[in-house]
Image (spheres, helix red, strand yellow):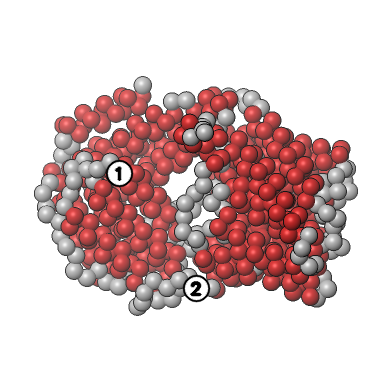
């Protein structure tokens, strides 16, 4: 028997599933979204309209991830609008023959390049291309504008559920933090204090490095949650800002590698509870002021208590929104150009094959190719394996259920069940594919199209083959300008700016904390890109050789500079030992 750790990295990744609690609020929203909309339309004698409503709700449900309600407006609404536009545009292209292939290739180029801007743009680009294919190929009686309106209405219903339904209560929340509208922001800020406490507990042990990475992730998530200047988040932004010096002190203590008293972690834990309840800080146990790190921790706790008891403050939590110029640079940069070309090639080639073969549901082939070519869904080999396995499993499951379920209401009930399962199935791409396959086949059945389970399998396998070819085609300068190299360059630049600020003796602490946040954030993004590239097939993974070692050196450098900054605050000068250590790491990075 082959053990999992002996499998090739690309195969081991395909078998690995994420572990997370069941997102019950998302499960409830999924059950109340596509299924009820389809039921109402079928009962009204408009099943085709119900298919479009349910399709909009389903694709919005795929993007319904944990986060804040304010963020959900853009995370779900942006892709939904792009999908509605794609539905209108696709309907106008119906019956276009091979002219359609050129249009698909051009749209793929644009949609793929835009996807390099960020997660929301990536989801919007994907939904635009998927709905263009569906609009061009799905035989429905509605006009293009009606299709777009129905699709957007289905997504809007899920957004209403996302905003209106309360999250599970976490205790009483007095004062200005009352209500459920900012539950996501509150939980994100509380998670930062919990992560600080966990890092302090792990200091001096083997888990310290992982806890420091978890603290970075918690800070990133809270920073994203608090973007903008909503009045209801003013107090939370101040409390997030109070966590930055705590995170700095905890990181310095972890870098020193010596265990700290258990009492040190109690203060951050009480602050986390206060954030969840919207309460003042209350009495906080002070750590022994032995050494620069513990003194910095004690001072940070005192400042945090003042912020919590004051109850308001401007805070400096929100990360500036990406400017249009920055978005344009990412679109036209190396990653945007390469991704755009690969998406355009996959989308156009799959449309050409579909037009040549003329299968009944030809639009499935380009729509499937768009999902498969997305790099943010995992490594290419893993995506292809999981998509193929999930489609086969979903088609077989649907064939068995469709043989015994009454039509159309049995299929409508199955749509509701699948909508509830999507948030759970996102832990593994194959499971998500299987659930979505069953749901889509139900919609096709309700819409009155002929049996589609077996053609779904063959067209998915064709799309897998096309995307594998497009994804492995050589790209000019890939050894110099790949996504990994771009991420590493950004992380290196951010780290060096942080180094210069600390070693210059600048006393602007708020500026230093912002630079440290940017250094750790870009480092986390670079590490994620390296880990993704390392589990590709060897022909692609070889481009990231040596990149993991660079991230390790960068991580040690940023940790060392953070510890140095705490020493500078304590003594007013850069210790010779720290300067030599930082110099050695810079030399190692340059080599």
Q: Circle 2 — which element?
A: loop
Would residue 236 appear left or right of 405 to someone viewing this image?
A: left
Which residue lies most toward the top here? 591
Give me the disc on residue 166: 2
Picture coordinates of residue 101, whole percent (x, y): 81, 40
| Residue 530 visible to the viewer | no
Quarter of the image for the C terminus: give it: top left
Q: Circle 1 — which element?
A: loop
Q: What residue is at 24 percent from the left and 51 percent from the top?
A: 201
Q: Which residue is mark 1?
A: 207
The front one of 238 and 212 is 212
Q: Nearer the viewer, mark 2 or mark 1?
A: 1
Picture coordinates of residue 4, whole percent (x, y): 49, 36
Would residue 414 appear left or right of 48 to someone viewing this image?
A: left
Quarter of the figure with residue 298:
bottom left
Residues packed near mark 2 inside 10 Å, few (<14), some (14 to 19) or many (20 plus) = few
Picture coordinates of residue 337, whole percent (x, y): 62, 35
> Vertical placement of 369 versus 150: above or below?
above
The front one of 300 and 272 is 272
Quarter of the figure with residue 521:
top left
Distance from disc 2 to disc 1, alpha carbons, whole Å, reads 35 Å
> Vertical placement of 472 versus 307: above or below?
above
Dot placed on the residue nearer the N-terminal end, 2 or 1: 2
Q: How many marks?
A: 2
Q: What residue is at 42 percent from the left and 70 percent from the top?
A: 232
Picture coordinates of residue 497, whole percent (x, y): 35, 38
Would residue 567 appear left or right of 224 to someone viewing this image?
A: left
Q: What residue is at 29 percent from the left and 29 percent from the top?
A: 585
Contact check, label 2 and label 1, Cβ < 8 Å: no
Quarter of the figure with residue 399:
bottom right
């Amino acid at each position: 028997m082959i053990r999992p750790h002996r499998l090739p990295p690309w195969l081991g990744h395909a078998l690995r599933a994420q572990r997370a609690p069941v997102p019950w609020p998302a499960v409830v929203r999924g059950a109340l979204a596509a299924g009820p909309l389809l039921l109402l339309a079928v009962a009204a004698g408009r099943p085709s309209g119900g298919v479009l409503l349910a399709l909009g709700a389903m694709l919005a449900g795929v993007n319904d991830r944990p986060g804040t309600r304010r963020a959900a407006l853009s995370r779900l609404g942006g892709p939904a609008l792009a999908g509605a536009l794609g539905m209108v545009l696709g309907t106008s292209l119906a019956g276009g023959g091979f002219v359609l292939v050129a249009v698909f290739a051009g749209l793929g180029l644009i949609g793929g390049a835009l996807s390099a801007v960020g997660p929301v743009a990536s989801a919007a680009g994907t939904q635009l291309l998927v709905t263009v294919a569906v609009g061009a190929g799905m035989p429905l009686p509605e006009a293009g504008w009606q299709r777009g309106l129905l699709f957007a209405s289905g997504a809007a219903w899920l957004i209403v559920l996302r905003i209106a339904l309360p999250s599970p209560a976490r205790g009483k929340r007095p004062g200005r933090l009352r209500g459920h509208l900012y539950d996501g922001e509150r939980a994100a800020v509380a998670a930062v204090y919990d992560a600080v406490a966990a890092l302090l507990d792990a200091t001096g042990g083997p888990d310290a490095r992982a806890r420091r990475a978890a603290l970075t992730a918690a800070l990133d998530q809270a920073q994203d949650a608090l973007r903008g200047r909503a009045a209801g988040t003013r107090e939370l932004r101040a409390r997030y800002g109070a966590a930055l010096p705590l995170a700095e002190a905890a990181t310095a203590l972890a870098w020193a590698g010596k265990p700290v008293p258990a009492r040190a972690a109690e203060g951050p834990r009480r602050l986390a509870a206060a954030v969840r309840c919207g309460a003042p800080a209350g009495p906080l146990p002070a750590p022994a002021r032995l050494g620069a790190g513990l003194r910095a921790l004690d001072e940070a706790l005192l400042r945090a208590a003042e912020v919590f008891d004051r109850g308001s403050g401007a805070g400096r939590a929100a990360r500036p929104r990406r400017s249009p110029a920055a978005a344009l640079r990412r679109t036209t940069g190396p990653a945007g150009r390469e991704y755009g070309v690969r998406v355009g090639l996959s989308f156009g080639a799959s449309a050409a094959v579909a037009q040549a073969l003329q299968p009944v549901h030809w639009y499935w082939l380009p729509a499937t190719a768009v999902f498969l070519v997305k790099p943010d869904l995992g490594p290419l080999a893993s995506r292809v394996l999981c998509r193929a396995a999930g489609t086969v499993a979903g088609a077989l499951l649907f064939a068995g259920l469709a043989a015994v379920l009454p039509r159309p209401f049995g299929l409508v009930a199955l749509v509701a069940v699948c909508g509830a399962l999507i948030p759970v199935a996102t832990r593994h791409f194959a499971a998500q594919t299987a659930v979505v396959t069953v749901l889509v086949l139900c919609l096709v059945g309700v819409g009155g199209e002929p049996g589609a389970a077996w053609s779904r399998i063959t067209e998915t396998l064709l799309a897998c083959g096309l995307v594998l070819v497009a994804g492995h085609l050589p790209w000019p300068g890939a050894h110099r300008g790949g996504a990994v190299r771009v991420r590493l360059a950004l992380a290196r630049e951010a780290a060096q700016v942080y180094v210069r600020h600390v070693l210059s003796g600048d006393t602007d602490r708020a500026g230093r904390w912002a630079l440290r946040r940017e250094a750790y954030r870009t480092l986390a993004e670079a590490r994620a890109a390296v880990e993704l590239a390392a589990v590709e097939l060897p022909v692609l993974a070889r481009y990231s050789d040596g990149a993991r070692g660079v991230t390790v050196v960068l991580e040690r450098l940023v940790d060392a500079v953070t510890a140095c900054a705490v020493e500078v605050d304590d003594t007013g000068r850069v210790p010779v030992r720290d300067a030599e250590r930082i110099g050695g790491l810079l030399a190692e990075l340059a080599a």
